[in-house]
Image (cartoon, helix red, strand yellow):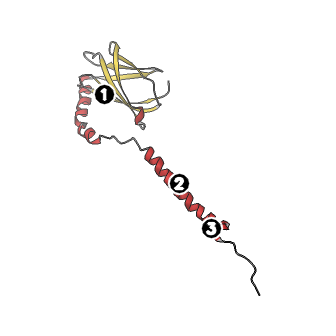
Amino acid sequence: MLNTTQTTPWYKQFWPWFLLFLPACAVVASISTFIIAQKNSPSLVIKNYYKEGLAFNSKEKLLTNAKELGISSTLSLDKRMLTIHLKGQHGHPPLIRVSLRHSTISQHDKVLTLVEISDSTYQAPFVLPKPGKWYLNIKNPSATWSIDLVSHFTQP
């Protein structure tokens, strides 16, 4: 008896292609994940961490000087203006420097120079790029004292 059934080649059948499709999807997904990770590197690590570590003692000295002088601050933010009121300071500098660092997104970090508008009240134009947790560092121009603050800003 002759066998008249013809078998189709493997590449014309469904199951080999189905079984090859799953590993191919995994390869494509891993390559695309690698590309995304390379384009969006995390910015949470300070690039000059060694210098930051060396400057830690001098920063602590500035913070201690502010405490000894009794300097404290209150801040407010409206739609277009950042206002800081310093308390307990003898002799008001004409301006102060404020570094604003977003807690997770370094692209929003800013350094502002605030000008004294009245007795120990300083202002500068500032539009909040992203609400959330912000770290602030306030220094006088001669860098003899410094204040660190953490503030949770919401969209005004």
Question: Which label number is shown at residue 16?
Answer: 3
Which residue bears the numbered disc 1? Answer: 147
Q: Which of marks 3 and 2 is nearer the N terminus?
A: 3
Q: Nearer the viewer, residue 66 or 141?
A: 141
Q: In which quarter of the image is residue 77?
A: top left
Question: Which label number is shown at residue 29?
Answer: 2
Q: Nearer the viewer, mark 3 or mark 1?
A: 3
Q: How far apart are marks 3 and 1 (CA)?
A: 67 Å
Q: What residue type is labelled 3?
A: Pro
Q: Which of marks 1 and 2 is nearer the N terminus?
A: 2
Asked whether the beta carbons under mark 1 and mark 2 sit within 8 Å of each other, the answer is no
Q: In which quarter of the image is residue 86?
A: top left
Q: In this view, does 53 lie above or below 27?
A: above
Instruction: Say which element carries label 3.
Output: helix
* Mark 3 surroundings: few (<14), some (14-19) or many (≥20) residues within 10 A: few
Instruction: Say which element carries label 2.
Output: helix
* Mark 2 surroundings: few (<14), some (14-19) or many (≥20) residues within 10 A: few
Screen quadrant of the N terminus: bottom right
Where residue 119 appears, x then y in whole percent? 32, 12
